Image (cartoon, helix red, strand yellow):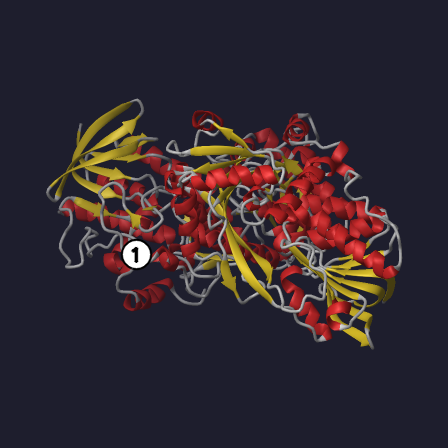
């Protein structure tokens, strides 16, 4: 089968690239061996978390790109970052929309009782961004072991209540199962009533981020109607239900637009002829099929997804064998302390590209003519420490597709 | 607070605890003071190898003889702390067979059962062995759980009247002419001060021997040698695998529950707490041990750790009693004029009981008391009713209530019930104390997920008096020391996940 564009990778950058190309009327195949990392790490949309709340994101970014000329934001330019974000937002119309609080970052409570900075927050987490001391009642569930109510509550300076709903589940329940249960009206009403019983003078109720997968606004709204105060979700240990929602929305939209969506398929081999990729063998055991396209986007992520692979001595990129910019020795990958003011050098490793996101060598020559690179596999960013993961994925996924369509 | 006792034992490793059991079984009141938790030193940082003594048969027959005798005793008194795996000594092509022949003769001379196996039988027993091996000899090596062994000794000693002060350090010793009159100590967690009046003092501090002796202006000639080990993700060998050659680095693979432990190295150290494993050591361990088991080259490692061996250098003047070349018992009365102070140092984990016996015999002699040792005769408390994985799994599988059945650690299948049991046994002073007593966080993710859950649980039990997130961060920082040297391949993927959770989602 032949496509205009093959996107490799089901993370946010791959999904954005596929959306952008599909909107451009192209015939797109998106393929990935898993379901991307949205359901692992992403709860909200980060842009540049370490900017203080008081700084307008526009100003902060302008200064950032001046200070970091090799950063993905600098490569794509601020105009494209803005366009890419607009494109992302268009996928989430009300009621379950994403928004920023003012022009800058906001702080949302987490499952460790800390606060984390982020930029775009889904409707179901908005109230948490304005949580004040003692105004919140934190609610957890016995049997749901990935949220420890009293721990979170005491860190946040709030009261906590651990609901015991043994009739509904008698042992353990996972986040995904709890989220689906929440979508059942009868269960949700029971939860709402229980919370209301325990509610004191609090003006907000915080729950772990399990308020449904399909229709989270309905779940939140339903609870608010019964309890009578604002309800918000708190990001917890993976799997991330909010992340799953984003993935599902993209998937639904892409399939509806005729994009070929191959989940759970891995690339076994890319066929290169000179500086062109001729096609890829896609493995879905026991069969392997050959797919070709005019253009390709490599959006395979970092170590978790296998976009980058490390052996005892060095890091390599397993599909196109692109050179990976990296520290000289494995001893220099990580610093001696886990927590540091400075990030671990290995996180900056990745594929070097020019401003059109095509991979280049040390002389600046294109390594491949018809392959573009997007997402966290790019070099010169520290997504975890900068709190820039989703922003980089959105901006570079969008740009790579635009550039691929131009070129 | 003032405490009076007959014998003050300083050091809560295998030797010190072994002495507390020996003395208390003899009816002698004793107090043991340890600045950390049990097994903070070499006792908690070794290979877990239950020696048959074969490794020393050629180079140190006396030590080998002691080992095999104690090996037999420990099988009787502590079967629940030992996995009787047997061991193999294998010769590779580059080793030749000369040493193997010496080895067989030497084992025979010191009464260590050593059986030559046909190579194909060895390969059937241990399929991952290098198919190119020249020879395999079976010996009664095994795997031992040092922490459980030490805890068991302590439990019994306590039952017979021994007292323990953990997380307590000796701050000064007062001399009166030729005797140590009093020891001052401080609880390192809450600052409480103790004055201890004892008739005799035993220095069982291992690598810290000189730091302790400094308090009375003494010094012994001692070197520190760091030994590093790597833990694999899965158990690669059922028996202990040794290299049949003169003892050297990276010679041994010990199976331990669900993992294998590669070891060891011998690096001169200046620091008593130099527990970092260097990158060259990691390469050495993998390259050498993979000659015995090639699968090690592709193995995933979950942790690197090191222990410090105190190496006593024998001194010119021989006025004190040296029991064997394996360990040394110093009578400071004979050596330095301080009549009621002795130091016991060196040895192997497997000879701890013998070291304790000799030390206790000396103390009794000094006391003028004629009671003999019974530690080799009496089984440890848990010996009669040990349950293993099967029982644990059955308990988890049964319809227990929501909380009890909740699994906290998915890697090692540790349930809430088990942790609650540890908490109620009491006397736990800090977070690491809890971790020492469970296999939680010892599996593949090294606590990446379960630590969050454990903290949540402990928060309710009030063990964690300080800020829980500080404890979490301290834990992650401590964990890091063991992880950083082995981050590549799958371990690196896992680490990306852990960092994304704690620094990313939780913004710690």
Q: Is any part of residue A93 visible from this angle?
A: no
Q: x and y percent of residue B97 in the render?
A: 42, 38
Quadrant including the N terminus of chain A: top left
Tell which residue pokes out farthest to the left in this image: A274
Residue B10's place in the image compared with A221, above or below, is below
Query: Residue at coordinates 69% horizontally, 54% vertically from top-left?
Result: B13
Residue, far top: A286
- Residue A58 position, x and y percent, is 34, 63
Tell me: A318 left or right of B5.
left
Left or right side of B456 for A43: left
| Residue in front for this viewpoint, A300 or B445 | B445
Residue B351, how many percent across, how many down? 67, 48
For residue B308, say whether it is visible: yes
- Residue B34 lies left or right of residue B157; in this view the side is left
Q: Label 1: chain?
A: A
Report the side of A256 relative to B484 (left or right).
left
Give the residue number, with chain letter if any, for mark 1: A326
Where residue A184 appears, as percent x and y from the top left, is 55, 30
Q: Quadrant of residue A104?
A: bottom left
Q: Looking at the picture, does residue A242 appear above or below residue A388?
A: above
Element assignment for label 1: loop
Residue B177 position (above or below residue A112): below
Q: Nearer the viewer, residue A116 or B444?
A: B444
Bin the neighbour count of mark 1 within 10 Å (Cα to Cα): few under 14, some 14-19, many 20 and up: many
Viewer-closest of B85 and B107: B107
């Amino acid at each position: 089968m032949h496509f205009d564009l093959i996107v490799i990778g089901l993370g946010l950058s791959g999904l954005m690239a596929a959306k952008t190309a599909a909107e451009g009327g192209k015939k797109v195949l998106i393929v990935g061996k898993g379901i991307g990392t949205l359901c692992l790490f992403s709860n909200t949309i980060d842009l540049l978390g370490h900017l203080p709340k008081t700084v307008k994101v526009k100003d902060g970014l302008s200064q950032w790109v001046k200070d970091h000329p090799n950063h993905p934001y600098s490569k794509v330019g601020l105009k494209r970052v803005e366009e890419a974000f607009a494109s992302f937002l268009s996928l989430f119309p009300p009621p379950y929309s994403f928004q920023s609080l003012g022009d800058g970052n906001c702080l949302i409570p987490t499952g460790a009782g800390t606060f984390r900075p982020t930029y775009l927050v889904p409707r179901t987490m908005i109230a948490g961004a304005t949580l004040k001391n003692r105004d919140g009642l934190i609610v957890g569930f016995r049997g749901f072991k990935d949220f420890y109510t009293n721990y979170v509550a005491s860190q946040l300076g709030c009261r906590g209540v651990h609901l015991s709903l043994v009739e509904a589940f008698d042992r353990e329940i996972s986040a995904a199962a709890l989220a689906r249960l929440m979508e059942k009206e009868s269960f949700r009403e029971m939860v709402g009533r229980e919370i209301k019983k325990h509610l004191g003078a609090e003006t907000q109720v915080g729950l772990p981020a399990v308020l449904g997968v399909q229709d989270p606004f309905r779940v939140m709204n339903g609870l608010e109607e019964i309890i009578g105060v604002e309800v918000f979700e708190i990001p917890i240990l993976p799997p991330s239900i909010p992340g799953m929602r984003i993935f599902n929305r993209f998937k639904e939209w892409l399939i509806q637009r005729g994009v070929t969506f191959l989940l759970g398929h891995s690339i076994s081999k890319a066929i290169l002829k000179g500086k062109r990729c001729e096609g890829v063998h896609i493995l879905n055991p026991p069969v392997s099929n050959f797919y070709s396209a005019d253009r390709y986007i490599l959006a395979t992520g970092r170590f978790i997804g296998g976009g980058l692979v490390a052996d005892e001595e060095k890091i390599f990129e397993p599909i196109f064998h692109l050179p990976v910019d990296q520290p000289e020795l494995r001893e220099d990958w990580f610093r001696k302390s886990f927590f540091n003011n400075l990030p671990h050098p290995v996180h900056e490793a990745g594929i070097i590209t020019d401003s059109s996101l095509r991979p280049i060598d040390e002389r600046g020559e294109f390594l491949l003519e018809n392959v573009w690179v997007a997402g966290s596999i790019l070099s010169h960013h520290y997504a975890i420490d900068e709190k820039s993961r989703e922003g980089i994925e959105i901006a570079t996924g969008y740009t790579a597709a635009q550039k691929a369509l131009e070129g | 607070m003032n405490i009076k006792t007959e014998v003050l034992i300083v050091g809560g490793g295998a030797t010190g605890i072994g002495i507390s059991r020996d003395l208390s079984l003899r009816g002698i009141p004793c107090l043991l003071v340890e600045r950390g938790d049990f097994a903070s030193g070499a006792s908690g940082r070794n290979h877990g190898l239950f020696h048959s003594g074969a490794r020393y048969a050629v180079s140190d027959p006396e030590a080998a003889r002691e080992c095999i005798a104690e090996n037999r005793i420990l099988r009787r008194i502590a079967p629940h702390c030992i996995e009787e795996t047997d061991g193999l000594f294998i010769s590779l092509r580059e080793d030749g067979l000369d040493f193997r022949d010496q080895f067989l003769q030497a084992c025979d001379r010191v009464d260590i059962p050593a059986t030559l196996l046909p190579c194909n039988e060895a390969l059937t027993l241990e399929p991952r062995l290098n198919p190119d091996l020249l020879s395999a000899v079976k010996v009664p090596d095994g795997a031992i759980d040092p922490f459980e062994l030490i805890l068991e000794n302590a439990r019994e000693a306590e039952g017979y009247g021994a007292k323990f002060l953990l997380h307590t350090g000796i701050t000064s010793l007062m001399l009166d002419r030729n005797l140590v009159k009093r020891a001052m100590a401080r609880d390192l967690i809450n600052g409480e001060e103790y004055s201890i009046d004892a008739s005799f003092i035993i220095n069982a501090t291992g690598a810290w021997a000189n730091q302790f002796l400094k308090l009375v202006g003494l010094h012994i000639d001692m070197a520190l040698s760091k030994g590093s080990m790597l833990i694999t993700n899965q158990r690669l060998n059922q028996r202990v695998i040794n290299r049949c050659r003169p003892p050297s680095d990276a010679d041994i693979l010990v199976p331990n529950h669900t993992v294998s432990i590669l070891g060891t190295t011998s690096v001169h150290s200046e620091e008593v707490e130099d527990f970092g494993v260097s990158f060259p050591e990691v390469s050495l361990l993998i390259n050498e041990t993979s000659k015995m088991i090639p699968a090690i080259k592709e193995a995933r490692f979950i942790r690197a750790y090191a222990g410090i061996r105190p190496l006593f250098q024998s001194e010119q003047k021989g006025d004190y009693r040296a029991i064997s070349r394996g360990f040394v018992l110093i009578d400071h009365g004979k050596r330095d004029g301080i009549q009621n102070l002795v130091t016991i140092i060196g040895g192997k984990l497997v000879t701890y009981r013998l070291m304790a016996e000799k030390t206790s015999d000396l103390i009794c002699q000094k006391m003028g008391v004629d009671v003999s040792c019974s530690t080799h005769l009496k089984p440890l408390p848990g010996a009669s009713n040990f349950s293993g994985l099967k029982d644990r799994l059955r308990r988890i599988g049964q319809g227990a209530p929501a909380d009890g059945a909740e699994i906290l650690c998915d890697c090692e299948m540790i349930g809430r019930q088990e942790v609650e049991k540890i908490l109620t046994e009491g006397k736990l002073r800090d977070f690491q104390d809890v971790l020492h007593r469970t296999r939680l966080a010892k599996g593949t993710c090294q606590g990446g997920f379960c630590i969050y859950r454990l903290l949540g649980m402990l928060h309710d039990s009030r063990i964690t008096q300080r800020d829980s997130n500080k404890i979490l961060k301290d834990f992650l920082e401590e964990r890091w020391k063991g992880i950083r040297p082995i981050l590549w391949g799958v371990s690196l993927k896992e680490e990306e996940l852990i960092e994304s959770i704690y620094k990313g989602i939780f913004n710690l």
